[in-house]
Amino acid sequence: METILSFIVIVLLASILQTSTGFGFSIMATPFLLLLFEPKEAIQINLILSLFISCMLIRKIWQDTDYRLMKRFIIGSAAGLPVGMVLFLLADIGKLKVSVSIIILLLTLLLICKFRIRPTKARDVAAGGFSGMLTTSIGMPGPPILLYFSGIDTGKEKLRATTLAYYLFIYSASLLVQILFAGTSKTIWLSSAAALPIVLAGLFLGNLLFLRINQQLFRLFLYGLLLFTGVYLLIDSW
């Protein structure tokens, strides 16, 4: 019973966060799902539920999507996905998490200090590449995209819509790569199916929250997510 309640709380809070910011399900859910499931199961459940959220939301916010930027993210991530799968299968994931956490924390501190970058085509593609790599290696596509959007000071509507549209590709492709190379299990799909009503509740609550968040508060949410991710990955790697 305790495990079931923990699963419900994790999925609900992560769904609210993903719906209200466009990010956050993998950042919030993956660390805690790893306490309940094996790594492969936690990552694939995260991918399935995140894909479901994107499918449910994208029709309502499609008009805010930056299609050109989304396409560049997809091009970059297509190259990053196989690299991440190789890292997942062969590399020391602990060392990878340490490296990623340090980069996230340093860049987040720069963003808090008002450091900004000018968007270019190459940088758009690179952000997608790093996102694809982290998706199949540690199940977290969000941090590179979140850092990039924060660095170019993107508005919350465009950020959420473009990210969710991009996630339709990245989560579908990542799930396929995971199944092909790491396999899947009955537990993954039954747990994901059981979580769908909880995700729907999170979608409703997350949309209400999004309407009440101004741009400044939204940016603070993003910085908080990045700091949490960096600290978690650093602690989890020890």
Image: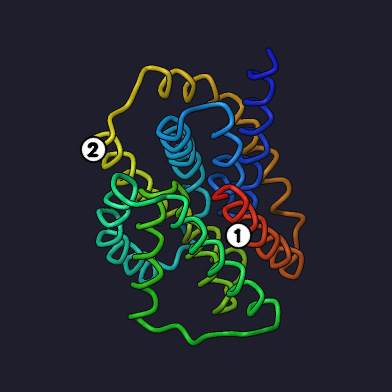
Q: Is residue 73 left or right of residue 195?
A: left
Residue at 70% in and 17% down: 2
Q: With respect to residue 70, does 171 lie above or below?
A: above
Residue at 43% in and 41% down: 51
Residue 97: image tag: none
Q: Residue type at mark 2?
A: Phe
Q: Is residue 117 left or right of residue 126?
A: right
Question: Depth check: 102 or 62 in front?
Answer: 102
Report if the CB atoms under discs 1 and 2 are less than 8 Å apart: no
Determine the CA span between mark 1 and mark 2: 27 Å
Label 2: few (<14), some (14–19) or many (≥20) C-alpha neighbours in 10 Å: few
Q: Secondary structure at mark 1?
A: helix
Q: Secondary structure at mark 2?
A: helix
Q: Residue type at mark 1?
A: Gly
Q: With respect to residue 53, does 199 lie above or below?
A: above
Residue 85: % across, % down: 29, 49
Q: Which residue is mark 2?
A: 181
Place residue 29 in its image quadrant: top right
Q: How is the image coloured?
A: rainbow
Question: Depth check: 194 or 94 in front?
Answer: 94
Residue 97: % across, % down: 49, 55
Q: How many marks?
A: 2
Residue at 23% in and 38% down: 181
Residue 14: % across, % down: 62, 41
Q: With respect to residue 63, does 136 lie above or below?
A: above
Residue at 47% in and 61% down: 162
Give the mark, 1 or 2, whose residue is nearer the N terminus: 2
Q: Quadrant of the N terminus?
A: top right
Place residue 10 in its image quadrant: top right
Q: Is residue 9 left or right of residue 186?
A: right
Taking the view exactly as shown, the residue that stands out farthest to the left is 180
Residue 230: image tag: 1
